[in-house]
Every structure is written in C-alpha cells, then in structure tokens.
Amino acid sequence: MAKESTTIDVGEPSTVTKSSSHVAVDEKKKGFVAAAAGGGYKRGLTIFDFLLRLAAIGITIGASSVMFTAEETLPFFTQFLQFQAGYDDFPTFQFFVISIAIVASYLVLSLPFSIVSIVRPLAVVPRLILLISDTVVLTLTTAAAAAAAAIVYLAHNGNANTNWLPICQQFGDFCQATSTAVVAASISVVFFVLLIVISAIALKRH
Amino acid sequence: MKNESTIIDVPAESSSAMKGKAPLIGVASGSGGYKRGLSIFDFLLRLAAIIAASVAAGTMFTSDETLPFFTQFLQFEAGYDDLPTYQFFVIAMSIVSGYLVLSLPISVVTIVRPLATAPRLLLLVLDTAALAFNMAAASSAAAISYLAHNGNQNTNWLPICQQFGDFCLKSSGAVVSSFVAVVFFTILVVLSGVALKRH
C-alpha cells in the first residue's frame, strides 16, 4: 500500500481580529434577547409559549371554578324532579372539576420549564419534557371538556328515544354556568394544541 | 502573517472494497439510523391505530338492537342514531380512520428520508389535531355510555342498558376501542417530537 501525503497550509489564528469583534458584539447585544443565530426565533417562540401558558392557567382555573359554583335552587317544589342542581349531581361534572383543576396545577408547575427554555433556547431536554407532558394533559383536558359537553347537550335537548328529559328548562342558571365552563375548557384545548405545535417547531433541527 | 503548514498522510487505496459490503438500509451518518427506526415504528403504530379506529366506528355503526317484546313507555329499538353523541362518535372515528390512511404515505416519506423535518412536523401537527378530535369523540361517547349504564337519579334519567343489553355492550366496546386509538395517537405525537429534535 503506497502512502501518499498532502500538504495543508494553516494560516495564523486570527486572535487579534476575533477579540475585537467579540467586544463589539458584546457591547451591542448584551440584552436579554441576544442569542446565537439558531436561538433567536426559538426564544421568541418560547416567550409566546410562556404567555400562552399564563393564559391557559387563567382559563382553566376559570372553567373549574365556574363549574364548581354552578348551583341552583328552585324556589318552588315539584313532585318528580329535585329542586336543587349542583355539579355533584353529575359524576361527569365531578370528573370535569377535578381534572381541569389538575390541568391548571400542571400548567403552573410547567412554567419553570418554559422559563428554562427561554433562557436556553437551544436546549432539547426541557422542550421534550414539555412536549410529552403537554400531550398527556391535552388528552385529559379534551376528555373532561367533551364528556361535560355531552352531558350539557343532553341537559339542553334531552333525548326522546330514551325518555331523558331536558333539565335546562327548569334549571336555567345552572345550565348557563355549566355551558360556560365547557366552552372555557374547549378554548384551553385549543391553547394546548398550540403549545404542542410550538414545542415541536422549536425542537426541530435546522 | 506567517504561514504554517502541516503534512497529512492519505492512504492511496480507495475504500471501494469496503463500500460494496455496506448494508442496503444503512445511512451514512449515525443520527439517521435511529430516526429511521422511529419512523418504522411510527408506520406500524399507524396501521394499528387504523384498525382500532375503524373497529370503533364499525362496532358503533352496527350496534342496533330490536327487543322482541313491546313496552308501552320505551321504544323497543335502539341504534347509534338515537343518540346524537353516538352519531358524532361514528362520524368522528370515520374521519380519524380516513386521516390515518392518508397519513401513511407521509410516514413512508419519513422512513425513506429520516433526516427531513418538514414531513415529521406536518405529521406531528396533524396527529395532535386528530388526537384531540379522537379524544373528544371517545370521551363524550363514554359519558353517554356511563349514563346508559347507570342513569342519573337527580334528573330522572333512566339507565337504558337494563333493557338494551346488546346495544350497550357493543357501544361500550366501541368506546374502549377508540380509547385504544387515543393511546396510539399519543405515542405517535411523542415519537414525532423525539424524532424531530436536533443532536
């Protein structure tokens, strides 16, 4: 095996030019937004992610508390129907209150991970953790919102085939409160989908 | 500027002999290998999810039951179209199965080009939307199934399963199958997220 050899010219390391450019960069971009070329738009995405999380916290806490306080007592007495309605009369609504509360506390606990991703936009592990746990919480939120929506639909319309009477005709306020809670939970589902997509875009390589 | 020079030894013989022995599936860089494996697993999961989703839709669609006797107060026929939530369930699971079949080619693209991010990102976004849609159908049908099994004393909603046993059994089975599809979707989303990340 004949060996060939080649000669490569290596120039003198340009330490002089490097240090001057570094000083210029540091003076101009010392602010919070400065980052390497790849981290710029990822940091922006993560800030948007953080704000979305704050909004989702507000909405989920609102949904859970509106459902929790959705009680109504009718002033009159009827022979066949109960004259009180509350969230604990429906196991589905109990599930809704508990799971949306769990989702709200998860969101609060995920805020530090989001902050870490803002500070280190190129780090992969916090984002991946957020993506996986956001997916799990998305399924929980959707389950609670959809199940409660099915019951709210029944309460509004009833079902002639199964002889299930619509109770909203008697309990108007209760129906209003539960419907509001379901709508708020559905909005938080949209937020979660956005959060997952943001994490995925921020994860991808260039 | 003083020029320095260094000498690097290069073997004359090319490695064409070694190239011929390389496996067909192998990828040049190391990072494409495990991503290709993830894509193959993704494809198989998609096939399984197609089965789960279409079984759910089909079972709910054919869950009719006609009672042999006549009662004065309750209808003696029960089908999925008697409950709007079950109608939504059948339609949603059919849409989800159709989406899964259409996403198979994109999954094949990610197997063939494991380092491309655009197909994976597209799959992740669409899978997340399909996951939410699937879960909505599954859990609303589960709420109605729970009512059909247990009823609600406070609202005087009677449990219909005591009369319509077969209908209840089939509809509950369909709901369980769609929850299995939800689990598959969750794994698919997480898979796409892991395969997207840079090294």
Image: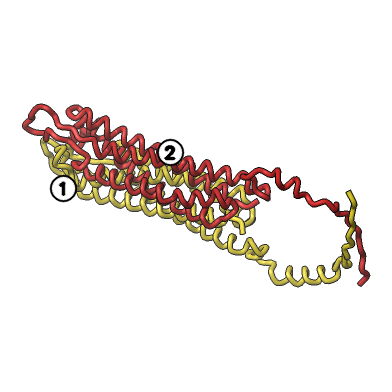
Chain colours: A yellow, B red
Front one among B18 and A105: B18
Snapshot quadrant of residue A75:
top left
Percent position of residue B126, x then y: 44, 53
Instruction: Name the residue beneath numbered marker 1.
Output: A169
Q: Quadrant of the N terminus of chain B?
A: bottom right
**Residue B48 badge:** 2
Residue lying at 8% horizontally and 30% vertically, measured from the top left: B71
Q: Which chain letter goes with mark 1?
A: A
Front one among B88 and A46: B88
Percent position of residue B60, x then y: 27, 38
Percent position of residue A21, x then y: 78, 71
Q: For this view, does A16 lie left or right of residue A169?
A: right
Percent position of residue B80, x then y: 22, 40
Amino acid type of the residue that numbered disc 2 sits on in the rendered structure: Ala
Residue lying at 52% horizontally and 60% vertically, measured from the top left: A48
**Callouts 2 and 1 close, C-beta under 8 Å:** no
Snapshot quadrant of residue A96:
top left
Front one among B51 and A97: B51
Q: For this view, does B6 lie left or right of residue B167?
A: right
**Label 2 – label 1 distance at C-alpha:** 45 Å
Disc 2 versus disc 1: nearer the observer: 2
Q: How many marks?
A: 2
Q: Is residue A112 at all visible to an observer of this figure? A: no
Q: Is residue A35 at all visible to an observer of this figure? A: yes
Mark 1: secondary structure: helix
Q: Which chain letter goes with mark 2?
A: B
**Does label 1 lie on the same chain as label 2?**
no
Q: For this view, does A5 lie left or right of residue A161?
A: right
Residue lying at 57% horizontally and 55% vertically, measured from the top left: B116
The residue positioned farthest toward the left in the image shown: B72
Amino acid type of the residue that numbered disc 1 sits on in the rendered structure: Gln
